[in-house]
Image (tube, grey):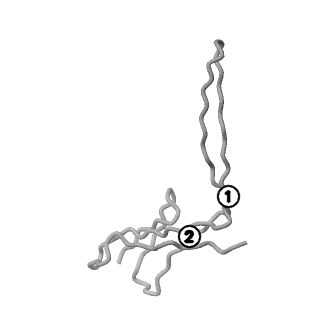
Amino acid sequence: MAAPSIRSITAAKSTLQPGESTVVTIDAFDPDARTITLNGRVVDGDGNVSTVTTQLTVGDPITFELTSNDQTVAIVADPANPGRFSVTV
């Protein structure tokens, strides 16, 4: 099993004044993930057929962490968006 891979880490604002905040986003992926294709089909009483396809990605869960060695920095993870953090200086 391969280690997760980080594509990038970006801050919405790269310069902050004391008391200001920015959003930092970590973009990462699981290289062991696989894609599954699902096919749906419906038929009505006249024999008319409609189909649709969608894909799902199956991978190991990834845990995102953002830390700072500066104890005055507050970092709060976005519970609705893994890999997204609010950083206040």
Is 75 above or below relative to 41?
A: below
Task: Tell me the quarter of the picture where residue 62 sits.
Answer: bottom right
Q: Residue furthest right?
A: 1
Is 46 above or below relative to 55?
A: above
Of 4 and 53, the residue lying toward us: 53
Of 24 and 40, the residue lying toward us: 40
In the picture, the disc for residue 34 is 1
Residues at marks 2 and 1, CA–CA distance in whole angstroms? 20 Å
Where residue 43 appears, as percent x and y from the top left, is 65, 21
Mark 2 vs mark 1: in front: 1
SS assignment at label 1:
strand
Tell me the residue at 50%/56% (across/down). 80
In the picture, the disc for residue 64 is 2
Label 2: few (<14), some (14–19) or many (≥20) C-alpha neighbours in 10 Å: some
SS assignment at label 2:
loop
Q: Amino acid at mark 2?
A: Phe
In the picture, the disc for residue 83 is none
Sequence-earlier tag: 2 or 1: 1
Tell me the residue at 40%/80% (across/down). 73
Of 78 and 25, the residue lying toward us: 25
Tell me the residue at 30%/73% (across/down). 20
Q: Amino acid at mark 1?
A: Arg
